[in-house]
């Protein structure tokens, strides 16, 4: 089954419907993950996302709100917003929308108690996003992939920041929030055209 059809995998299970299965799967998760974006417009040299899933595409805001309300009604207090590149949310909409706008809409139009961002690129951390993170309903946790601390390797990886830009961003976060959890990904054994090994770190 091609990746783009994976949402229909439920149809391959005889006598099951999405309604039968999804809530029972979700019940075992403390934090349901809501996918708000897929694909990516970046071209990191080690990553196959764009080939596998194409350019960035986003779920329309109303659908995101419906998903949140659905999980809230099932008793969940927290949801995780997930995407490959939250910076590229809804680029096709006239009003340029990004993760800040999405968070504003969710805060205003739902009453879910906690909202958590999944992985986000360090250069998406605008002052506006940090302002919104101050809201009590947004979890004080960020996962910011670093991938390498070496500018030459970051260049080979085609990442869009330098090691010092990454460090300054982390320092800005820590100045603003003294009790925040920060996670990262580090690729070790990076070869320009070869295998990679990924390590996840959490503070
Ligand atoms: S930003 Fe993430 S998803 Fe996009 S190409 Fe780079 S590693 Fe892949």
Image (cartoon, helix red, strand yellow):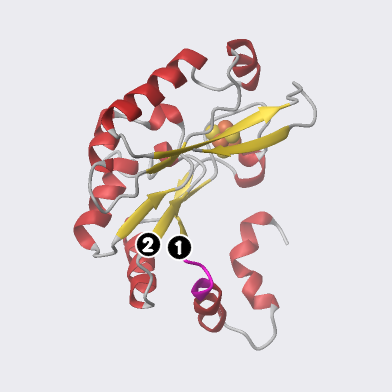
Q: Is residue 98 magenta?
A: no
Q: Is residue 138 above or below residue 47?
A: below
Residue 165 visible? The answer is yes
Q: Is residue 161 left or right of residue 74?
A: right
At horizontal 74% and vertical 31% (from top left) the residue drawn is 196
At horizontal 66% and vertical 34% (from top left) the residue drawn is 47
At horizontal 28% and vertical 35% (from top left) the residue drawn is 130
The residue that disc 1 covers is: 31
Q: How many marks?
A: 2
Q: Is residue 181 left or right of residue 183?
A: left
Q: Secondary structure at mark 2?
A: strand
Q: Is residue 26 above or below residue 139?
A: below
For marks 1 and 2, the one nearer the N-term is 1
Question: CA separation, marks 1 and 2?
Answer: 5 Å
The location of residue 149, given as percent across then percent down, is 58, 18
Looking at the picture, tell me which residue is in the foreground, 13 or 55: 13
Q: Which residues are magenta?
A: 26-30
The extreme right residue here reads 194
The location of residue 118, given as percent across then percent down, is 46, 47
Q: Quadrant of residue 147?
A: top right
At horizontal 44% and vertical 29% (from top left) the residue drawn is 122
Residue 36 visible? The answer is no
The quarter of the picture showing ligand 1: top right
Looking at the picture, tell me which residue is in the foreground, 65 or 94: 65
The extreme top residue here reads 152
Q: Residues within 10 Å of mark 1 (few under 14, many from 20)?
A: some
The extreme left residue here reads 108
Q: Are marks 1 and 2 in contact (CB under 8 Å)?
A: yes
The extreme bottom residue here reads 15
Please identify the dominant SS of the magenta region: loop
The residue that disc 2 covers is: 78
The location of residue 100, given as percent across then percent down, is 29, 41
């Amino acid at each position: 089954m091609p990746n783009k059809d994976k949402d229909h995998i439920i149809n391959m299970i005889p006598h099951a419907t999405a309604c039968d299965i999804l809530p029972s799967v979700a019940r075992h998760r403390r934090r349901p993950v809501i996918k708000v974006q897929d694909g990516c417009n970046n071209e990191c040299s080690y990553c196959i996302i764009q080939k596998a899933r194409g350019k960035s595409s986003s779920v329309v805001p109303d659908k995101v709100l419906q998903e949140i309300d659905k999980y809230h009604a099932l008793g969940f207090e927290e949801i995780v917003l997930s995407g490959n590149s939250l910076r590229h949310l809804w680029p096709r909409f006239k009003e340029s929308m990004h993760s800040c706008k999405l968070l504003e809409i969710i805060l205003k139009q739902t009453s879910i108690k906690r909202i958590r961002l999944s992985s986000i690129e360090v250069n998406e951390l605008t002052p506006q996003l940090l302002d919104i993170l101050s809201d009590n309903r947004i979890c004080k946790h960020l996962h910011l992939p670093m991938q390498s601390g070496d500018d030459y390797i970051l260049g080979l990886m085609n990442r869009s920041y330098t090691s010092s830009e990454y460090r300054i961003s982390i320092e800005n976060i820590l100045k603003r929030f003294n009790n925040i959890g920060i996670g990262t990904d580090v690729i070790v054994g990076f070869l320009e055209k070869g295998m990679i090994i990924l390590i996840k770190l959490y503070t």
